[in-house]
Amino acid sequence: MQAETLFISDLHLCAARPETTRRFLSFLAGRAQDAERLYILGDLFDAYIGDDDQSSPNREVKSALGRLVDSGTSVFFQHGNRDFLAEEGLCRETGVGLLGDYAVIDLYGEPALITHGDLLCTDDVLYQKARIRVRANEWKRNALSKPLFIRQWYARWYRFKSGLDKGKKSRMIMDANPQAVIESIQRHGVSILIHGHTHRPAVHELDVGGKPARRFVLAEWKETGQALCWREGGTWMIENIL
């Protein structure tokens, strides 16, 4: 096991994307076992409707995560906008640690801020209002109290509606707001920000209050996967996961 940490996000695993699931399971059984830590920054699942959903690929993914943790790699998960109903049941079943919307971690002596990324998209006002509503504990309790088949139907409807809503919005609205990025970096006292959500992979060099900072935007897993690998000593690289 190397002194390195891996970051991934936006896999959107579901039955309709078997090749992505295959790639991720292979990643967990191979490459990820070389790392000290793996951070999954949200949207691991395309529609996670509760810890009691043991349909495929949820069942296989949970088992594989558990095996990775048992092998010695620490795994941490942040909620995305598609899997925010994941709760402590997922953690108990897999050994994965659940983090809050923002978390400052130690990258071998360098503090770094990690987040899914949707909270940075402040120009999408309608989404931010909806996010507050569905993240409320009362809304989540009500949703999870519904029979599983009702939640499955709702998830299919949500995916359809989400696709329609995205088609009506400009790319700028759905991207991270530059001021929100700077404020998050300043508020948490870091010079490294890592997030996903926007599906616009890039490394941005920033000036924050006269000091250099860097923003890493993780890629969505589609034809290939991608991981940010950070090694002891401050070296990093983007790895393609085939």
Image: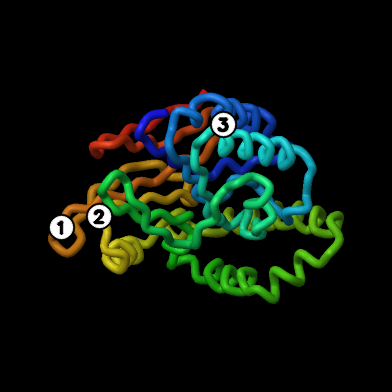
Looking at numbered disc 1 in the image, what kind of residue is underneath it? Lys
Looking at numbered disc 2 in the image, what kind of residue is underneath it? Ser
The quarter holding residue 227 reads top left
Label drawn at residue 28 = 3
Looking at numbered disc 3 in the image, what kind of residue is underneath it? Leu
- Which residue is at a point 35% across and 34% down the rendered structure image? 3
Give the labeled residue for mark 2.
191
The kind of secondary structure element at disc 3 is helix
Q: Reading the chain from its start, which is encountered first: label 3 or label 2?
A: 3
Snapshot colouring: rainbow
Q: Position of residue 181 (x, y in %)?
A: 33, 61
Q: CA distance from mark 2 to mark 1?
A: 8 Å
Q: Is residue 155 above or below residue 144?
A: above
Q: Sort mark 1 into few (<14), some (14-19) or many (20+) by Cα contacts within 10 Å.
A: few
Q: Reading the chain from its start, which is encountered first: label 3 or label 1?
A: 3
Compare residues 192 and 36 and report the one nearer the observer. Answer: 36
- Which residue is at a point 63% across and 52% down the rendered structure image? 91
Q: Position of residue 135 (x, y in %)?
A: 61, 69
Left or right, 63 with reference to 219: right
The kind of secondary structure element at disc 2 is loop
Q: Sort mark 3 into few (<14), some (14-19) or many (20+) by Cα contacts within 10 Å.
A: many
- Which residue is at a point 57% across and 55% down the rendered structure image? 166
Between disc 3 and disc 2, the foreground one is 3
Do the residues under discs 2 and 1 have CB atoms within 8 angstroms?
yes
Q: CA distance from mark 3 to mark 2?
A: 29 Å
Q: Position of residue 192 (x, y in %)?
A: 29, 52
Give the labeled residue for mark 1.
211
Q: CA distance from mark 3 to mark 1?
A: 37 Å
The kind of secondary structure element at disc 1 is strand
